[in-house]
Image: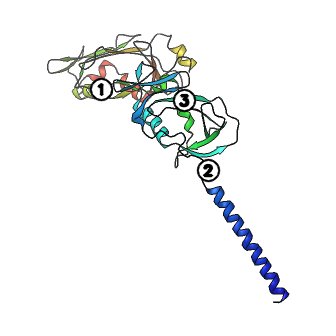
């Protein structure tokens, strides 16, 4: 064998050895050496309750999920939570110091307790089992949003956004009482076969029906916790613009909502329930609600 051929053989064997080494190292790196499903709940039907931080307790009573034993939980938010719990996977272990985070405890057939937090830019979500120093970056494959945001919701944000579900078929009486003027107040009553609008005749029946149907599956944009928005806390102590009262055949008690003047430049109206809960509704829908009695008069 010539010297040239021997040199080529040595180079070839060297390259082959390097490729073999990289192949095995790559296989080790690509292999999963951790439990992808460490934080996954496989069966949500076995969950009896969930505590998130110190302020949110979700419990199931007589088939209904409630937040802090007060209000029904919003179905879409609960569904999102269960979707995270059943689909979350460990992306990789990370070598960072564990933070206090938000403590989450899932009770039931397969109890699970972990802490959740994120990086400063909220682009990565970290989980760590309670009492463990091991930290894992978690994700839902194909979903790139920050998962920790759901666990940061305040108690009011877990509440079912449905305020009233009534329509022209169930409403018996509706009153909109403007606090600063009596000229625009109106009352819509069901009388025998159809509705009458006090002091208005003849009425536009289509206008009445369309108005009453505004309250079919009527939802708030969001329930507000006291202290979250100072401007709304201050506004709630002012006299309301109007009070809306709705009586329906399938309600145990009338729905009473105080409506406050819209703040300059704001896109929402503040409303308050009879028991003092604050909520906001977008101005587009409120413009449809804040009518005057003349709006129901039939025009030829």
Q: Position of residue 19 (x, y in %)?
A: 71, 69
x and y, in percent, of residue 3 in the image:
85, 86
Q: Earlier in the sequence, mark 3 or mark 1?
A: 3
Looking at the picture, tell me which residue is in the foreground, 112 or 57. 112
Name the one closer to the observer, 64 or 4. Answer: 4
Q: Cα distance, mark 3 to mark 1?
A: 44 Å
| Residue 112, above or below 233 | below
Q: List the residue tagged with mark 1.
A: 211
Res 203 → quadrant: top left
Q: Residue at x 79, y 82 (%)?
A: 8
Residue hosting label 3? 104
Q: Which residue is mark 2?
A: 33
The percent position of residue 1, horizontal first and vertical second, equals: 81, 89
Q: Residue furthest left?
A: 192
Q: Is residue 264 visible?
A: yes
The structure residue drawn at horizontal position 80% and vertical position 78%, both measured from the top left corner, is 10
243 over 20 or under it: above or below: above
Q: CA distance from mark 2 to mark 3?
A: 25 Å
């Amino acid at each position: 064998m010539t010297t040239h051929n021997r040199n080529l053989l040595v180079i070839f064997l060297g390259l082959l050895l390097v490729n073999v080494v990289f192949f095995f190292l790559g296989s080790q790196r690509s292999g999963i050496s951790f439990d992808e499903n460490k934080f996954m709940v496989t069966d949500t039907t076995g969950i009896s309750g969930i505590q998130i931080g110190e302020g949110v307790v979700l419990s199931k009573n007589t088939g209904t999920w409630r937040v802090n034993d007060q209000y029904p939980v919003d179905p879409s938010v609960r569904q999102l939570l269960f979707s995270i719990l059943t689909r979350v996977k460990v992306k990789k272990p990370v070598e960072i110091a564990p933070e206090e985070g938000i403590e989450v405890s899932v009770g039931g057939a397969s109890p699970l307790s972990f802490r959740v937090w994120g990086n400063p830019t909220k682009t990565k979500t970290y989980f760590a089992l309670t009492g463990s120093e091991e930290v894992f970056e978690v994700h839902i494959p194909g979903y790139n949003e920050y998962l920790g945001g759901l666990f940061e919701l305040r108690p009011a944000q877990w509440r079912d956004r449905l305020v009233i579900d009534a329509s022209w078929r169930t409403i018996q009486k509706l009153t909109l009482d403007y606090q600063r003027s009596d000229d625009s107040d109106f009352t819509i009553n069901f009388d025998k076969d159809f509705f009458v609008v006090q002091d208005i005749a003849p009425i536009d029946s289509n206008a009445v029906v369309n108005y009453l149907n505004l309250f079919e599956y009527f939802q708030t944009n969001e329930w507000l916790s006291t202290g979250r928005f100072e401007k709304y806390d201050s506004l709630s102590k002012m006299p309301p613009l109007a009070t809306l009262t709705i009586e329906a055949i399938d309600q145990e008690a009338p729905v009473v909502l105080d409506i406050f003047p819209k703040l300059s430049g704001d896109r929402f109206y503040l409303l308050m329930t009879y028991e003092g809960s604050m909520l906001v509704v977008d101005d587009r829908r409120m413009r449809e609600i804040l009518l005057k009695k003349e709006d129901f008069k039939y025009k030829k």
